[in-house]
Image (tube, rainbow, N blue to C red):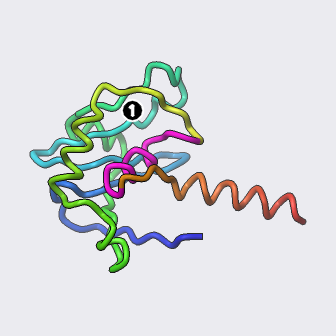
Amino acid sequence: MKKTHWQLVDLYAGAHIRVQTPNYYHHGIYIGNDEVVQFGMPNEVYGSWDEIKVLRSPIADFCGEATFIEVYVYDRKERKRKRSDDEIVATALSKVGEGGYHLLYNNCEHFANFCVFGVASSTQIDNMYSDVDKMLKK
């Protein structure tokens, strides 16, 4: 299981950010000027997935009721693999309007990691599968 590193640091364009909701972390890409590109709004996962789209929004909308924003801090190996901050922003903006949301296979964390690394992945989902696997092996 991959250990992730999140910190309360200053935002910068191209940052992979997250906020905590009552049940999960919501992820997005900070693009500067107090704007975020995100795959849906934090509470939309409880509605119709067909309607969830990648959108550009004010950071206040991204935060919802969260009181702080965490920024992903890359380790040395990840820094070698990640796109430049400008490429991350461009990738995020190029996805605005796209749909295809799925909680397990194409969620906000998958989106943010795709923007950063070119590969969609979700540590939250990987951890959930790992927890279920451990429960079934008991």
Q: Quadrant of residue 81?
A: bottom left
Instruction: Say what secondary structure mark 1 lies in.
Output: loop
Q: Residue at x 59, y 52 (%)?
A: 125
> Count the marks: how many?
1
Three-letter amino acid code of the residue under disc 1: Gly
Counting from the top left corner in percent of width and height, residue 10 is at: 18, 64
Q: Residue at x 52, y 49 (%)?
A: 24
Q: Is residue 32 left or right of residue 43?
A: left
Q: Residue at x 33, y 80 (%)?
A: 76
Foreground of the two, 98 or 127: 98
Above or below, 95 against 83 in this view is: above
Q: Which residues are magenta?
A: 105-117
Above or below, 11 against 106 in this view is: below
Residue identifier under label 1: 40
Q: Majority secondary structure of the magenta segment?
A: helix
Counting from the top left corner in percent of width and height, residue 65 is at: 36, 42
Q: Residue furthest bottom?
A: 76
Assess whether residue 112 is covered by the magenta stretch.
yes
Foreground of the two, 127 or 82: 82
Q: Residue furthest left?
A: 33
